[in-house]
Image (cartoon, rainbow, N blue to C red):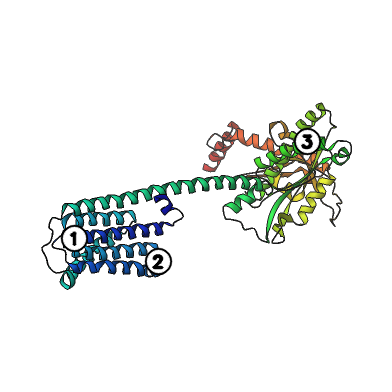
Amino acid sequence: MVKKLFEHKAPYQLVQILRYLGFTILCLLLCVSFITEIVVGLESLYLIPFIFLALAFEEKIYQKVEYHYGKEARQSAIFLVDIFLCSLFVAAIHALIIPSFVLICALLFFATYTKVPKFIVLSSTIIAVATFYFSSVLFFGFEPYLQSSSRELNILSLLFFMIYISLFIYYQQYQYEQLQQENSHQLDELNRYLKLNNQLARYAPVQLWQSIMRGEFEARIEYKHRKLTIFFSDIQGFTDLSENLIPDDLAFLLNDYLRHMTEIAKHYGGTIDKFMGDGMLIFYGDPNSRGEKEDALACLDMAVTMRQQMRILRERWIKMGYTSLNVRMGIATGYCHVGNYGTAHRMSYTIVGRDANIASRLQTAAQVDQILISEETFNLVKDEFLCIKHEPLILKGISEPVKSWQVVERYHESIEKYRTWFDFESKGFNLLLNLDKTPIYDYPELIQVMQEAIERIKLQQQRTDQEGAVMLSKEHMVQITQSDQASSK
């Protein structure tokens, strides 16, 4: 019965029901006190219709208070009205000890439960004292106060107080169970949302949906101008292979290849734009960028790692009975438009620009396991990667010949001797050597100049001490002595 009373009720409605129950108990106690107590007069019964009239019209006042001042003001207003009505009740029963004490405890319990501000509770004492005094003067008279009430009234007061507190505690427990159920439901919904989010995130670049989840990016039609390093790749001969394999084997090869390449791209922080059959479009520089040079280096590190991984996959596929497959890659750096293209109902996050076309054409022009890069990419990575210069390429859709380089490997000890770029500067010394732009017929003269410079540095090293002072030989010392003697004469 009590549970049905609380079902499908908002918290403020349940508190209102408990208040109505509490004031009904007060009216019953008022009737009992009139019957059992000599000090309670007939005028005290007039308080009963006044209480119910106040309860009938107070809800509209509370709604206006909540609308203008908020829920906390509503709770404070309810508490002050209760103080006023309870003060009238105490004056009507001439402050009988046990009923008055029980009523004060009930009010304090209500104030604590509904979290009434402390300054409202303290200021309510002024309202209570004033109401008690003026109601005694005007209506209930000055009979002896703080007398002991009858046994029946004391028992009923304590009994009704226990019932009132028990209902409050039951309501609190009921509300706690409801919150537990809501939290459990919300947790299930959150887990379901996360699962769906993780599934949907696989259809968009990880950097993009992370930016959306953090509120840094909005799904609307817009684009921006950014300098990007763009990577294109595909499997050479895959189209011919698709005609000779059943769909299941073809799907296995493609998914195996894309799975490994995607893990490598994620490791190096690339934004995976799209898969185009066996082709991949990846770019660096948006939505996150580490700088133009660092983006280009990360892209080439990714490409070299993909090429190495492809060798491993190729050996495994051959052992499984599949044809040998090779990868081709093209990389270019330049300004492109990047953002959302399409309509408000269906959009795609991608890039548009001349350098994106150059990267795609370089990939098409690359040979087996080759990585071709544009001139601007080469200028960013030439200090870190060994590259071989190609003849300018005539690419489809590009009006001018495109200079390109083939990436061999990142510089390390075993290939340091193949470097074609030297740039060293120190105090009194500056070396800038670019072998890619040095004609081969100038090599003998360069070698002679470098050898002469080395011999001069060695001679200077012999003539100076560790502190940098020039040391003179014995012959120079004799010449200086003779010169001094001649000048003295």
Left or right placement of residue 269 versus residue 360 in this view? left
| Residue 238, image quadrant | top right
Viewer-closest of 489 and 16: 16
Pointer 3 residue: 252
* Mark linked to residue 66: 2
Q: Look at 85% across and 53% down and name the residue there.
A: 401
**Label 1 CA crowd tier, 10 Å (few <14, some 14–19, many 20+):** few
The residue at the point 18 percent across, 54 percent down is 98
Q: Is residue 90 visible?
A: yes
Residue 54 image-quadrant placement: bottom left
Q: Nearer the viewer, mark 2 or mark 3?
A: 2
What is the spatial separation of the Cα atoms under label 1 and label 3, in whole angstroms?
93 Å
Q: Is residue 355 above or below residue 410?
A: below
- Pair 1/2: label in front: 1
Name the residue type under label 3.
Phe
Q: Where does label 1 land, which residue?
A: 35
- Quick check: 211 above or below 372? below
- Is residue 130 visible in the rendered image? The answer is no
Q: Residues within 10 Å of mark 3 (few under 14, many from 20)?
A: few
Q: Residue at x 68, y 39 (%)?
A: 263
Give the distance between the C-alpha atoms of the residues marked 2 and 3, in whole angstroms.
64 Å
